[in-house]
Amino acid sequence: QVQLVESGGGVVQPGTSLRLSCAASGFTFSSFGMHWVRQAPGKGLEWVATIWYDGSQKHYADSVKGRFTVSRDNTKNTLFLQMNGLRAEETAVYFCARDKNENWGPDQYLDYWGQGIPVTVSS
Amino acid sequence: EIVLTQSPATLSLSPGERATLSCRASQSVGSYLAWYQQRPGQPPSLLIYDASSRATGIPARFSGSGSGTDFTLTISSLEPEDFAVYFCQQRSNWPSITFGQGTRLEIK
């Protein structure tokens, strides 16, 4: 079965960096676009970034553009999110999610999600 | 940015009743709308995409309708496990996606 397991979260100070990982299993990772979505405590969902199945294209929310970088290692079935210049308002649970579309560009519907990893940005 | 507004914020119903949840877009999104269910402490799960197509394994009591700016998620007869938060999501201005603020479906 499809499994997505995030890691790398924690408590960091404003302005610092953190790298999240998402280990995928149960499907052909290299055939699917992947996403990061975050959810602040008690709030709704905010899309963060998308990467194509082959890593050829990456897309970001305006709120993180220039500070966050999404990447993937298809040989290790792992998705990454490098977060620089973190802000207090970016305290949230970060989810990785699989795109529903296979072997093509992402259709931006998210059909499997990890359990999420908390990130707290606080001094 | 396309803003999605969900109503009501909270819906109180009993098991066996019919639930109707609304999502309104600030501009037309065609049929590029999805619905997700999120149970407490769990990640969201995809229910409906392209406004009316059920995702894999989703029971037939869940249905979606609408196009343009007005969309509805209907649960024909509520089961205990259906009490959760529901989010709509648009992908019309691909690759950017936005979510609604959610509707909490609670047991009356």
Image (cartoon, helix red, strand yellow):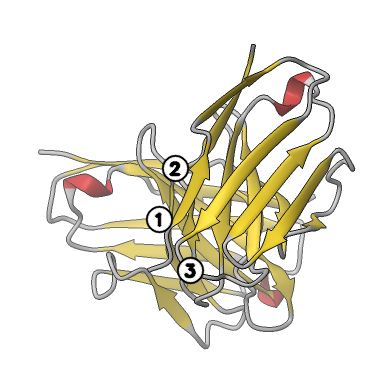
**Residue A105 appears in the rendering:** yes
Q: Are the residues flagged by discs 1 and 3 in contact, CB closer than 8 Å?
A: no
Where is A119 relative to B95, above or below?
A: above
Q: Residue furthest right?
A: B60
**Left or right: where does residue B16 sit relative to residue B106?**
right
Between B13 and A37, the residue placed more toward the observer is: B13
Between B80 and A106, the residue placed more toward the observer is: B80
Which residue is rendered at x = 40% and y = 63% of the image?
Answer: A81
Tell me the amino acid under the disc marked 1: Leu
Within 10 angstroms of label 3, few (less than 14), some, or many (20 or more) residues?
some
Picture coordinates of residue A104, whole percent (x, y): 70, 83
The residue that label 2 is drawn on is A117
Helix, strand or loop at label 2? It is strand
Between A79 and B96, the residue placed more toward the observer is: B96
Q: Which mark is residue A20?
A: 1
Where is B90 relative to A88, above or below?
A: below
Which quarter of the figure is the C terminus of chain A placed in? top left
Residue B106 found in image quarter: top right
Helix, strand or loop at label 3? It is loop
Mark 1 or mark 2, which is nearer the start of the sequence? 1
Where is B61 relative to B35, above or below?
A: above
Q: Nearer the viewer, mark 1 or mark 3?
A: 3
Q: CA distance from mark 2 to mark 1?
A: 8 Å
Which residue is rendered at x = 75% and y = 55% of the image?
Answer: B65
Q: Which mark is residue A75?
A: none
